[in-house]
Amino acid sequence: MQPDFRNFTLMKNYETTVLTTPYAQPDPFGALAQPVYHSAAFEFPSAAAMSDAFCGRSPRHSYSRISNPTVQNFERRVARYTGAMSVTALNTGMAAISGSMLNLVQKGCNVITSRHLFGNTFSLLSRTLGQFGVEMRTADLCNLKETERLIDENTCALFFEIITNPQMEVADIAALAQMAHSHGVPVMADTTIVPFTAFHAREFGVDIELISSTKYISAGATGLGGLILDYGSFDWSQSPNSLLQQQSRRAGKKAAFTARLKTEILTNLGIMMTPYEAYMQTLGLETLDIRFRRQASSALWLAQQLTHEPRICRVNHTALEGNPYHELSERQFGPLPGAMLTIDLATRDECFAFIDALKVIRRATNLFDHRSLAIHPASTIFGLFTPEERGEMDVLDTTVRLSIGLEDPADLLDDIRQALESLSPALQPIPSPSSLSPTLP
Ligand SMILES: *Cc1c(COP(=O)(O)O)cnc(C)c1O
């Protein structure tokens, strides 16, 4: 009955890499963990040294909105493990997404993406950036030809989430990237849902990887954070954005994105990660893979068990046999595609009653906390969209999202079962499976 946590191979040297990455300057006391440099400003020995730091001629820290040693230590560890050319830590996942988008777009440009997006990202592209003349073009990213038709000379990027939430749709990332690159379009992916220990974005052609480190990396939702990973794989002189073209001439074709991000966007918006948060997230990084494997194994095991529950109309998890994305998910993410699953009940009222009856699983938003969490996405994360907009995004009233934590999975199954048993006998007809199952290209 119990899941086997030993079955899944550890990403090569993950913990060794993270635990042996030294921090930049030795501490006078030989501290093994890097001290937290909770200082807004850094002092200089001379006016010339100050000028050198401010003008980028020396790597010294000057002010923590621009850079900070504790934050840099966190960024370096992520870079060392992932092989990213540059890593930037920000104060939320949305800061990583909005900062990258602002770095990339210009009036008259378009971004090609899916209708299946994290709610705030959808709103950022359609409303916040839309008002400045940036066009959000949506396609079914599982349909390569349809996606390709939307590309034109003003396309700034192709952007997607690797497993959409809560629809759990999976596109063929390597095929999308190859197509986008053939048109000179960079590929940006929000990979929050599967950590970089399991999904190696660069190998699939992702140029810019965006992560809400609030989720797996923060180790139990201790705080908020975001990461931008630039693999240095795209030639930004091809961008329709004239400011990125300028940066390409100044900083180099492959370095332009990060150069503009660090010298303009990050400092102008003030969205840098704080030192204490970087310290907490560095701790989280050290146990990331081990926690992920435990939580993701439990999620898969629970998904398998829940397919036998008669009150559940559908269990959605991409590693389940029979899931339309099963093969693609395994090829891209391996046997454990994350610790999230969704279940569909007969009605919205049943979803509410089910969530109210949970005793171990907590009623909270967020993903990949150490605690298991349940939420009804349509009435919360997507609650401010109109029913028509939710319909277009395939966010159903009958879906409950579960994020699986570190508890004993058998206790979680018992909790779900008792909550299902507490539901009154079915009042409404159960939707036909065809209205629920995601469509394939
Ligand atoms: C949570 C989340 C975000 C936003 O991250 P914050 O840290 O809450 O700003 C973006 N994308 C995905 C896929 C997420 O799950």
Image (cartoon, rainbow, N blue to C red):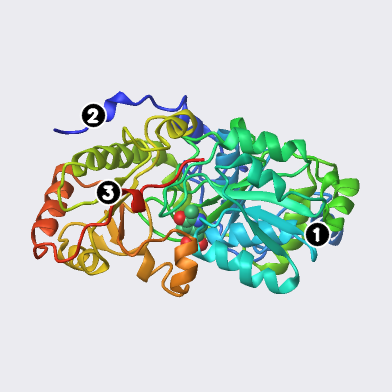
**For mark 3, does the 10 Å Cα neighbourhood hold few (<14), some (14 to 19), or many (20 or more) residues?**
many
- Say if mark 2 contacts mark 3, CB within 8 Å: no
| Dot label at residue 362 | none
Residue flagged by tag 1: what amino acid is it?
Phe
Residue under numbered circle 1: 54
Work out whether mark 1 precedes mark 3 in sequence or the reverse, and give the earlier one: 1
Please tell me in which quadrant of the rendered image residue 285 appears.
Answer: top left
How much space separates mark 2 and mark 3, taking CA atoms? 24 Å
Please give the name of the residue rendered at 34% of the width and 49% of the height, measured from the top-left corner.
434
Label 2 Cα neighbours within 10 Å, binned few <14 / some 14-19 / many ≥20: few
Res 375 seen here: yes
Secondary structure under the numbered disc 3 in the rendered image: strand
The structure residue drawn at horizontal position 47% and vertical position 41%, both measured from the top left corner, is 440
Residue 233 location, x and y as percent? 72, 36
Q: Residue at x 73, y 58 (%)?
A: 110
Q: Report whether the residue tagged 3 is closer than 8 Å to ligand 1.
A: no
Q: In terms of secondary structure, where does tag 2 sit?
A: loop
Is 103 situated above or below 239?
Answer: below
Q: Residue at label 2?
A: 4
Single out the mark in the foreground, 2 or 3: 3
Residue at 43% over, 68% down: 382
Residue identifier under label 3 = 314
Circles 2 and 1: CB atoms closer than 8 Å: no
Q: Position of residue 148 (x, y in %)?
A: 69, 44
Mark 1 residue element: helix
Distance from Cα at disc 1 to Cα at disc 3: 57 Å
Seen in the image, is 39 located left or right of residue 294?
Answer: right
| Above-or-below relation of 298 to 97 | above
Q: Position of residue 129 (x, y in %)?
A: 68, 68
Q: Residues within 10 Å of mark 1 (few under 14, many from 20)?
A: some
